[in-house]
């Protein structure tokens, strides 16, 4: 915990120092020292080196974590109806989240007004001429090894899902391979945390370069980006989830949000769905969800359902495309919806991974990864907020599914569980009373 905080503060210091140095450099006249040694020398090595190190992890991380995620499909099958309902809910809410994010991104236009195209080291390769048929056909890998080698994200996703599902269908005999992927997953996560140690220096260099080129415009654009992500997160939480719960269960929402507040305190401070999981399960059970549902839907959600992360990725795609003056056509937007939904499955519930899987979404539509450098500076703050939405999505689904399965105790939800009041004698009850009023009166008697 202490270490994590240490890294976060270091990243913040990196941004601050980067912004200050960048603004100083912007005010300085061009010279060999400024341009060749600093900006295009030392800082470029630090910044681009960091981005390349992230890129290095994308293919192994996505491959391994998608195989792990989909190889637990066996559990979904075992749980039958609940499993299918949960999966559908998770995938649909993620697709809704990312669509909302793209819409809000287009409305707020966070990247318009800041031109970073001069900072691109690699020419973007947006394939606008590709038709939907080509995209779908292009998802099937003719040679998966080649797809892995050339980083064809959609093909890698298709292959990993197929492999994972096959592992789960084979069952016991595939156990060694499943274990192998699980330990490879742990190793990938470790590599992520090692690379993240470089983040403060990478972010410092990237922010310095950005501010040295663009000056104050960068701050304004970053604030707009943060606003667009936050607004979409709020809409997802209080409009999308709220209406889904209300419409499908008819429950009042206050007890749900009230209970969720304690979970939110943990997700916000840890920025990790996994870290919050024990409390999430406990809280949902305390408001009436049966353990048989909560113990399945919540761990699955913490692993594969990341609506908040998908929102950040959607807005980030719009932001980065605008920074570099790249127009995203309808095919590119559809590809983003698809890849960000799958990236959400492949994002582990620990801090910062959404930023790594963002590079997979950017790559899938040919957007330059350099843009990550700018938003990484403010990512920790947004990570805290999006993790909260990630977990709220799991809880909303859990409520809906448990209610539809009849595995839900409404009295507990409204804090009117009569069980502990049974000690009162029957004669004290007004038998004509409605059950809710029963509880109120009993509570008064007990008080
Ligand atoms: N921190 C997020 C979570 O744990 C994942 C991410 O977006 O980085 O849910």
Image (cartoon, rainbow, N blue to C red):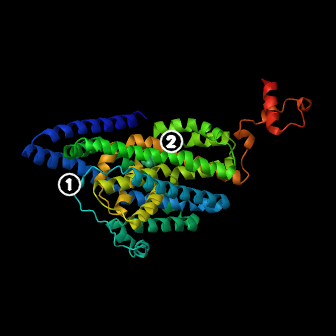
Determine the residue positioned at 60% across, 39% down.
257
Q: Is residue 140 left or right of residue 303?
A: left
Return the mark for residue 275: 2
Return the mark for residue 118: 1
Determine the residue positioned at 41% across, 49% down.
353
Instruction: Work out whether 438 lies above or below 86.
Output: above
List x then y, in percent, for residue 315: 40, 52
Secondary structure beneath label 2 = helix
- Mark 1 or mark 2: name the one nearer the start of the chain: 1
Instruction: Work out whether 61 lies above or below 335.
Output: above
Estimate the spatial distance between the alpha carbons at disc 1 and disc 2, rounded to whole Å: 41 Å
Quadrant where the image shows the N terminus: top left
List x then y, in percent, for residue 155: 41, 69
> Residue 143 lies in what quarter of the image?
bottom left
- Mark closer to the observer (1, 2): 1
Secondary structure beneath label 1 = helix
List x then y, in percent, for residue 261: 57, 36
Q: Residues within 10 Å of mark 2 (few under 14, many from 20)?
A: some
Return the mark for residue 414: none
Determine the residue positioned at 56% across, 48% down.
239
Residue 188 seen in render: no
Quadrant where the image shows the C terminus: top right
Cβ atoms under marks 1 and 2 closer than 8 Å? no
Q: Is mark 1 within 8 Å of ligand 1?
A: no
List x then y, in percent, for residue 445: 82, 25
Q: Is residue 364 left or right of residue 71?
A: left
Residue positioned most to the right: 427
Q: Is mark 2 within 8 Å of ligand 1?
A: yes
């Amino acid at each position: 915990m202490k270490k994590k905080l240490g890294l976060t503060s270091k990243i913040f210091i990196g941004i601050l120092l980067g912004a200050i140095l960048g603004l100083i450099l912007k005010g300085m006249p061009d010279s060999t020292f400024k341009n060749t040694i600093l900006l295009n020398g030392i800082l470029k090595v630090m910044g681009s080196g960091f981005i390349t190190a992230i890129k290095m992890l994308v293919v192994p991380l996505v491959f391994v974590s998608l195989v792990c995620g989909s190889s637990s499909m066996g559990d979904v099958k075992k749980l039958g109806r609940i499993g299918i309902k949960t999966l559908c809910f998770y995938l649909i809410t993620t697709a809704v989240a990312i669509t909302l994010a793209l819409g809000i991104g287009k409305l707020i236009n966070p990247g318009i007004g800041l031109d970073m195209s001069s900072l691109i080291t690699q020419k973007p390769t947006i394939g606008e001429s590709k038709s939907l048929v080509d995209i779908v056909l292009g998802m099937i890998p003719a040679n998966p090894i080649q797809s892995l080698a050339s980083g064809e994200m959609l093909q890698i996703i298709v292959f990993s899902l197929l492999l994972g599902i096959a592992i789960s269908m084979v069952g016991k005999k595939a156990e060694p391979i499943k274990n192998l992927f699980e330990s490879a997953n742990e190793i990938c996560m470790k590599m992520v945390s090692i690379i993240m140690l470089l983040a403060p220096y990478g972010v410092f260099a990237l922010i310095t370069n950005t501010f040295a080129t663009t000056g104050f415009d960068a701050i304004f654009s970053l604030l707009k980006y943060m606003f667009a992500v936050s607004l979409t997160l709020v809409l997802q939480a209080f409009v999308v989830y709220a209406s889904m719960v209300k419409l499908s269960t008819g429950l009042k929402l206050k007890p749900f949000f009230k209970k969720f507040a304690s979970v939110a305190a943990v997700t916000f401070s840890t920025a990790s769905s996994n870290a919050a999981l024990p409390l999430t399960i406990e809280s949902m059970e305390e408001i009436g969800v049966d353990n048989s549902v909560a113990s399945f839907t919540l761990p699955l959600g913490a692993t594969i359902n990341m609506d908040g992360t998908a929102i950040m990725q959607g807005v980030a795609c719009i932001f980065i495309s605008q920074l570099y003056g790249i127009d995203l056509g309808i095919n590119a937007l559809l590809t983003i919806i698809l890849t960000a939904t799958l990236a959400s499955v492949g994002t582990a519930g620990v801090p910062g991974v959404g930023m790594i899987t963002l590079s997979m979404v950017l790559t899938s539509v040919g957007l330059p990864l350099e843009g990550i450098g700018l938003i990484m500076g403010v990512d920790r703050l947004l990570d805290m907020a999006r993790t909260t939405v990630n977990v709220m999505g799991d809880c909303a689904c859990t409520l809906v599914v448990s209610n539809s399965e009849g595995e839900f105790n409404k009295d507990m939800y409204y804090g009117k569980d009569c069980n502990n009041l049974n000690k009162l004698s029957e004669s004290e009850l007004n038998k004509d009373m409605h059950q809710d009023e029963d509880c109120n009166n009993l509570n008064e008697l007990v008080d």
